[in-house]
Image (cartoon, grey):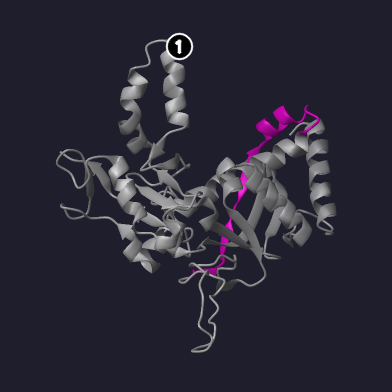
Amino acid sequence: MRNETRLAFNGFSKQVALLNAVASAAEKFTVTPTVQQTLETAIQESSDFLKQINVIGVDEQEGEAILLGVGSTIAGRTDTSVKARDPRSVGALKSDTYSCKKTDFDTYVKYQLLDAWAKFKDFQARLSGAIVGQQALDRIMIGFNGKTVAADTDRAAHPLLEDVNIGWLEKYRTKAPERVLSSGKVAGKITIGPTGDYKTLDGLVYDAIQLLDPWHRKRPDLVVLVDRNLLHSKFLANIEGAADNENELAAARILANGTLGGLPYVDAPFFIDGGVFVTTLKNLSIYFQIGARRRMTREEPERDRIADYQSSNEAYVVEDFGLGALVEHIEEAK
């Protein structure tokens, strides 16, 4: 580490310690709630997808889904000469529960990269941004692929972080299996094509909408989260037909404004292969426990790097199971 790099890094460490009212950032400390919220906001703002879902701080490590959303219709009338009025609950008919699990977000930056950054005035922002950006991507990956909570995670065996936490789709598989479609004429898969379970992907999505509670099926904010490979098959003809600039622009508009089963689709990062998920983005949440983020930033000269150790207690929550439907193991009919 060059001398000017050390000055920049020492300034970064002192700022972290000052913001959290601790003597040194090189010793493990609890991030103050204000700084924690600032960090959470930065993580959310670094990802277009995270900005569209809920990222919420909770006091308790375990509990029930907290967002208020009426899980059914409420309009009606009661003949009070016969019986008393019966209010509807403000909350989903089948709400999720959460258990915030400790998740480590440990990173390092080699001296060589720090030296390259040291000449920039925004050194601290660059270093913070590198740490924040990967946390955002990992959260999305866990949300769609997480299945278990392992005491000792295995990145080689589970490259999509399947063993870090229980994600939204796994919640549907275990808590709302009646809203999951994963098998058709052939056991273990759903096929699309002239001889398949559905002739088109649009038909499959339209049928999946029927798995939602009736009062949710025509909501204006419904979207389809879809595997990129399935989109490729559907729109390939439009892309290949773009032989000139005018057609290329037309193809781009088709892809940008496309729908599936009458709903706008979302090409979400790290979404599962062969899957379709009908819901609203605000039906998906990440809860983090307030006051439970720990951090330590220190130099590790024996490895020519600085390391940032962070942990957060967090959970992936479905606010209303009746507002979603999952179709998986989708393949083209042979």
The residue labelled by disc 1 is 245
Q: Is residue 306 magenta?
A: no
The one nearer the camera, 262 or 159, is: 262
What percent of the width, then of the height, locates residue 242?
A: 38, 16
Circle 1: is it few (<14), some (14-19), or many (20+) Cα within 10 Å?
few
Please tell me which residue is depicted at 44% across the width and 41% down the height of the picture: 265
Position in image of residue 228 (x %, y %): 39, 37
**Could you tell whether 13 is left or right of 129 in the image?**
right
Q: Is residue 304 visible?
A: no
Q: Secondary structure at mark 1?
A: helix
Relative to 215, residue 99 above or below: below
In the rendered image, residue 97 lying in the magenta stretch gets the answer: yes
What's the magenta region? 95-122
Q: Is residue 256 left or right of residue 272?
A: right
**Three-letter residue code for mark 1:** Asn
Return the x and y of residue 60 as percentages of the image width and height: 64, 72
Residue sitting farthest toward the bottom: 82
Looking at the figure, which quarter contains the C terminus?
top left
Of residue 328 and residue 222, the one placed in the foreground of this image is 222
The x and y percentages for residue 225 are: 43, 45
Left or right: residue 109 compared with residue 92: right
Count of numbered tags = 1
Q: Is residue 194 left or right of residue 259?
A: left
Closer-to-camera residue (227/92): 92
At 67% from the left and 70% from the top, the residue drawn is: 59
Residue 303: quadrant of the picture? top right
Q: Nearer the viewer, residue 83 or 310?
A: 83
Residue at 45%, 13% (x, y): give it. 246
Please identify the quarter of the rendering in which residue 25 is found: bottom right
Quadrant position of the N terminus in the picture: top right
